[in-house]
Amino acid sequence: MLLDLAGLREVDVNKLIIFMTVYREASVSNAACILGVTQPAISNALSDMRICFCDQLFVRRDGGMQPTTKADSIAESLLPILTSLSALVGQFTPGKYRH
């Protein structure tokens, strides 16, 4: 299988992290607090992702943000990827990685 590294450059990992945090928390407010960003930043990222995935992703309900079937599918695929990425980043030597 060929890995499309050029295509991956187009992916904003921060938006994927925002998606997973909203998915886990079922709350835009809680996700914003956890990630240290504003609620509008979370909403803007979700808006971009809704366009990208052609799906509403989350529906506001009394109990919080309910994921759509598509969001459930995305989260199922994304969780192991972000888990692996987190483990890899955890191996970086502090101060040696520069952005």
Image: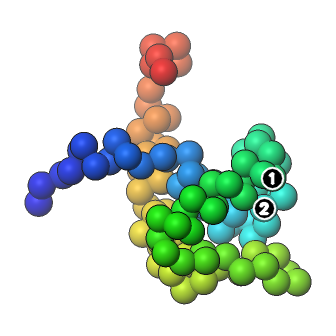
Q: Which mark is residue 92?
A: none
Is residue 4 in view?
yes
SS label for mark 1? helix
Question: In the rendering, at what x and y percent does residue 79 appear?
Answer: 49, 63
Q: How is the image coloured?
A: rainbow
Q: How many marks?
A: 2
Is residue 34 in view?
no
Rendered-image quadrant of the N terminus = bottom left
SS label for mark 2? helix
Q: Around disc 1, counting alpha carbons within 10 Å, would you say few (fewer than 14), some (14 to 19), or many (20 or more)?
A: some
The residue positioned 82% from the left and 83% from the top of the image is 61
Residue beneath disc 2: 28
Question: Observer-nearest residue: 80 or 53?
Answer: 53
Question: In the rendering, at what x and y percent does residue 30 appear?
Answer: 82, 57
Outermost residue to the left = 1
The type of residue carrying mark 1 is Gln
Question: In the rendering, at what x and y percent does residue 52 appear?
Answer: 47, 65
Q: Around disc 2, counting alpha carbons within 10 Å, would you say few (fewer than 14), some (14 to 19), or many (20 or more)?
A: many
The residue positioned 49% from the left and 75% from the top of the image is 54
Outermost residue to the front = 51
The residue positioned 60% from the left and 75% from the top of the image is 57
Q: Which mark is residue 39?
A: 1
Separation of marks 2 and 1 at Cα, in angstroms: 6 Å
Q: Is residue 58 above or below residue 80?
A: below
Q: Is 87 left, or right, of 34 in this rendering?
A: left
The type of residue carrying mark 2 is Val
Q: Is 23 left, or right, of 76 in this rendering?
A: right
Q: Are marks 2 and 1 in contact (CB under 8 Å)?
A: yes
Question: Observer-nearest residue: 31 or 42?
Answer: 42
Outermost residue to the right = 62
The residue positioned 77% from the left and 40% from the top of the image is 36
